[in-house]
Image (cartoon, rainbow, N blue to C red):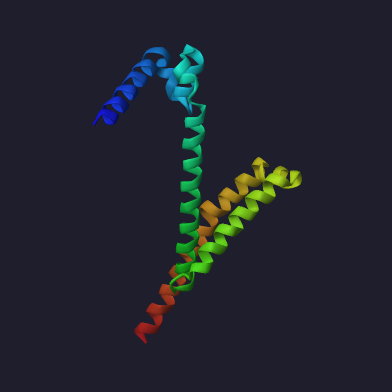
Amino acid sequence: SLWSVGTAAFVSALLLLLAGCLGRYAATQNFPVYVLASITEVRSLQRLDAVFIGVWMMGVVTKLACDVYACRVCFSSLTRKKEPRWASFGAALLMLGTAFFAVRSFSMQKVALNTSILFLTTLFTGFLLPALVLLADWLKNRRKEGKDSE
C-alpha cells in the first residue's frame, strides 16, 4: 500500500512539474521527464538516466518477442501447419546474428542506416508483402470455390 501511494505521489508531482515547467513543449518531446530534469536541474530527477535506459531495453525485449511471434504466425499461416519450435529459435538467432553483424560492420551500418533503403524495405514489408499474401490467399480461396462448385 505504501509503495503504491508513494509511486502515485511521485507520478503526480512529476506530472505537476511537467505541466507547470514545460507546458505544451512537453508534448513535443520523446522523453519529457528527461527534458524536465535537464531544464529544472532537480538533482533527484537527473539520476533517471538508468531508468530511461531500463525502460528502453524492456521495450526492445518486448519488440523482439513480438517479432519472433510474428515470424511464428507467418510461418504457420504460410505452411498451414503448426510451426515447429526450431523455426522460432532459428528466427531469433537470425535476428540476433543480423544485429551483431550490423554493429560490427561499418559497411553494414551504412546500408542499414540509409534512409532510402529503409523507406524501400518499409514499403515492401508494410505494404507489398502483405498485399502479396492477401492476393495469394484470395487466389487460393477462389480456386477452392471453383473446385467446390464442380
Q: Position of residue 8 (x, y in %)?
A: 29, 26
Q: Quadrant of the N terminus?
A: top left
Instruction: Check the image and report above or below for 117 versus 145.
Output: above
Instruction: Check the image and report above or below for 8 versus 98.
Output: above
Q: Nearer the viewer, residue 51 or 65?
A: 51
- Number of marks in the rendered image: 0
Instruction: Check the image and report above or below for 84 versus 46.
Output: below
Left or right: where 103 falls relative to 51 = right
Which residue sits at x=43%, y=72%? 82
Residue lying farthest right?
Answer: 107
Q: Position of residue 36 (x, y in %)?
A: 46, 18
Which residue sits at x=60%, y=45%? 119
Which residue sits at x=52%, y=53%? 127
- Residue 124 sits in which quadrant? bottom right
Q: Is residue 4 visible?
A: yes
Q: Position of residue 87 (x, y in %)?
A: 53, 66
Left or right: where 1 falls relative to 34 = left
